[in-house]
Image (spheres, rainbow, N blue to C red):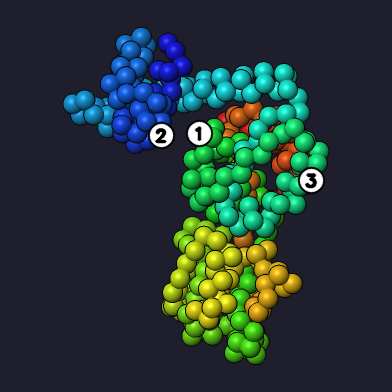
C-alpha cells in the first residue's frame, strides 16, 4: 500500500470516476491510475469501485467505507508534513486564502495588513473564485482557509464558522428617481433594469428569494462577480445596482448614491471554512482570529477534530 494508490482512490471519487481528470490531477497517466487502484484492491482483497467494462461507475458498499479511511489517512499525512514544517519554521511559510472577490476586495485588506505586521515572514497567497471552487480548493488542500457568503456550509467535509452579517444596498446615480421614494419597495425596483451579482455569489440567493416570495419579477439585465464592475455599469446609466453593503464607500464612489435595502432582502452571513481534520499552523489560527475575533483557537481545534455529523 502506498500514498499514490490512496490518492488515486480519493481523486477518482472526487472527480466523478473520470480517470482522465484523475490522471491530470495527479500528473500521471490514465493506465497508471487504473493500475494503482487495481493493485490496492488486490492487496486489500476488496473491490472498491463498481465498473462497466474498464470504466469506473461508482463506489461499492465496502468501497464507501474504505474511502472514508483513505481520506483520513491522506489528511493525517498532510497534517504530519505541516506539523514538521511548523516546528522547523515557527513563524514563516505560506498561508493560502481562497475568497470571493467581494471578501478579497473589501473585507480582507485590513486583516491582511494586521496579519503581515504580526507575521512578516509568512507569505499570503490570495486566490479568488466562486464559493464552489473555494470549497473544492479547501477540500483538496490547495487552500488553507476559504471565505465566502454562500455555499461553504453545504459541504460536510468542511467545518465552517459564521463570521459577520451584512445587508445589500441599492446603488443609483446622483439624481435618480428612487432617491425620492422612501422606503423603496420591491415593486419600485422591478420598474428599473437591475445589475447585481452572478448566481451563487454575495447573497444573490436572498435577492432572488425576496422577489420570488413577493411575486415580483425583476428585470436583471446584467450580472457580475465583481462589485466594482456592477457599480461601473450603474454609473454608466445601464441600471440600478444591488451590491453588498461593505462594497460601497461614500467618499470613493463619486457620482453614486446608496439606498438602504435591509428591509427588502434577508441578512447575509459570511462564513470561514477549513477542512475537517486539517492541521492548522499557529499563524493560521491567528489569521482566523483577526478576521473573526469571536473565533478562539481552542474552539476551532475542537470543531476540526469532530467527525462528520
What residue appears at the point 64 percent right and 56 percent down from the top-left corner?
Answer: 105
70 vs 268: above or below:
above
Residue 93 as seen in the image, left or right of residue 207: right
Report how far apart the C-alphas of labels 1 and 3 lie in the structure: 28 Å
73 vs 201: above or below:
above
Disc 1 target residue: 140
Labelled disc at residue 14: 2
* The image quarter in which residue 77 lies: top right
What residue appears at the point 40 percent right and 34 percent down from the top-left corner?
Answer: 14
Residue 293 visible: yes
For numbered disc 1, what is the local secondary structure? helix
**Relative depth, front residue between 300 and 281:** 281
Report how far apart the C-alphas of labels 1 and 2 lie in the structure: 9 Å
Which of pointers 3 and 2 lies earlier in the amino acid sequence? Answer: 2
x, y percent for residue 151: 52, 50
x, y percent for residue 104: 63, 52
* The image quarter in which residue 260 lies: bottom right
Amino acid at each position: 500500500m502506498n500514498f499514490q494508490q490512496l490518492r488515486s482512490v480519493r481523486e477518482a471519487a472526487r472527480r466523478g470516476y473520470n480517470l482522465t481528470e484523475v490522471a491530470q490531477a495527479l500528473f500521471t497517466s490514465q493506465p497508471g491510475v487504473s493500475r494503482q487502484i487495481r493493485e490496492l484492491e488486490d492487496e486489500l482483497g476488496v473491490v472498491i469501485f463498481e465498473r462497466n467494462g474498464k470504466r469506473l461507475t461508482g463506489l461499492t458498499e465496502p468501497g464507501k467505507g474504505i474511502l472514508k479511511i483513505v481520506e483520513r489517512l491522506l489528511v493525517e499525512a498532510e497534517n504530519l508534513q505541516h506539523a514538521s514544517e511548523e516546528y522547523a519554521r515557527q513563524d514563516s511559510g505560506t498561508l493560502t486564502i481562497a475568497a470571493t472577490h467581494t471578501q478579497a476586495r473589501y473585507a480582507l485588506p485590513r486583516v491582511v495588513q494586521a496579519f503581515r505586521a504580526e507575521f512578516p515572514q509568512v507569505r499570503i497567497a490570495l486566490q479568488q473564485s466562486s464559493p464552489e471552487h473555494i470549497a473544492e480548493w479547501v477540500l483538496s488542500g490547495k487552500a488553507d482557509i476559504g471565505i465566502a457568503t454562500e455555499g461553504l456550509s453545504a459541504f460536510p467535509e468542511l467545518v465552517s464558522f459564521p463570521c459577520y452579517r451584512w445587508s445589500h444596498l441599492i446603488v443609483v446615480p446622483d439624481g435618480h428617481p428612487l432617491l425620492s421614494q422612501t422606503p423603496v419597495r420591491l415593486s419600485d425596483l422591478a420598474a428599473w433594469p437591475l445589475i447585481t451579482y452572478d448566481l451563487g455569489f454575495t447573497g444573490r440567493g436572498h435577492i432572488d428569494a425576496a422577489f420570488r416570495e413577493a411575486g415580483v419579477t425583476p428585470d436583471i439585465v446584467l450580472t457580475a462577480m465583481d462589485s466594482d464592475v456592477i457599480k461601473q455599469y450603474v454609473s454608466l446609466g445601464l441600471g440600478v445596482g444591488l451590491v453588498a453593503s461593505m462594497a460601497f464607500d461614500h467618499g470613493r464612489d463619486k457620482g453614486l448614491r446608496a439606498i438602504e435595502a435591509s428591509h427588502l432582502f434577508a441578512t447575509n452571513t459570511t462564513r470561514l471554512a477549513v477542512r475537517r481534520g486539517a492541521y492548522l499552523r499557529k499563524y493560521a489560527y491567528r489569521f482566523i482570529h483577526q478576521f473573526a475575533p469571536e473565533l478562539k483557537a481552542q474552539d476551532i481545534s475542537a470543531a476540526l477534530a469532530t467527525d462528520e455529523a
